[in-house]
Image (cartoon, rainbow, N blue to C red):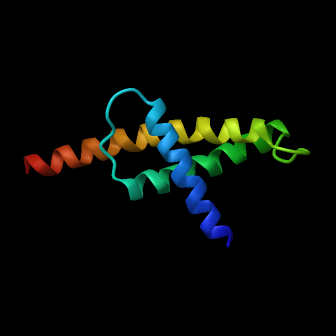
Amino acid sequence: MSWLWAIIVGLVLGLIAKAIIPGKQQIPLWLTTVLGMIGAVVGNWIAARFGINETRGVDWGRHLFQLIGAVAVVGVGDALYSMVRGNRSRA
């Protein structure tokens, strides 16, 4: 069941990150989900470094770090995807 939640959270964070990043992103939905999952893991790691990985109630700080991580990872992933895809179409 934890994998299902990871996929759902990755999808939601990836879609929010795509909405925050200006311009049109070229990455497909499956890659958005994977990058959102990676961003959530990065955000959890950063939250743990700040000591806010587990709090009482809703972990707003951890969720904020997850979103920031997702925006960064989706932005970099989109740039890499566009670069690789652009090079393939010219060959």
Count the numbered circles shown.
0
**Residue 73 shows in the view:** no
Question: Viewed as shown, does residue 15 lie left or right of 90?
Answer: right
Residue 22's place in the image compared with 89, above or below, is above
Residue 87 image position (x, y, % from top left): 17, 46
Q: Residue at x 80, y 42 (%)?
A: 59
Residue 60's place in the image compared with 88, above or below, is above
Residue 20's place in the image compared with 88, above or below, is above
Q: Residue furthest right?
A: 56
Q: Residue furthest bottom?
A: 1
Question: Viewed as shown, does residue 13 lie left or right of 54?
Answer: left
Residue 41 image position (x, y, % from top left): 64, 51
Residue 61 image position (x, y, % from top left): 77, 35
**Viewer-proximal residue among 63 and 38:** 63
Residue 5 image position (x, y, % from top left): 64, 63
Q: Quadrant of the N terminus?
A: bottom right
Q: Residue at x 71, y 47 (%)?
A: 44
Question: Viewed as shown, does residue 89 lie left or right of 81?
Answer: left
Q: Residue furthest left?
A: 91
**Viewer-proximal residue among 5 and 72:** 5
Q: Which quarter of the picture shows residue 49?
A: top right
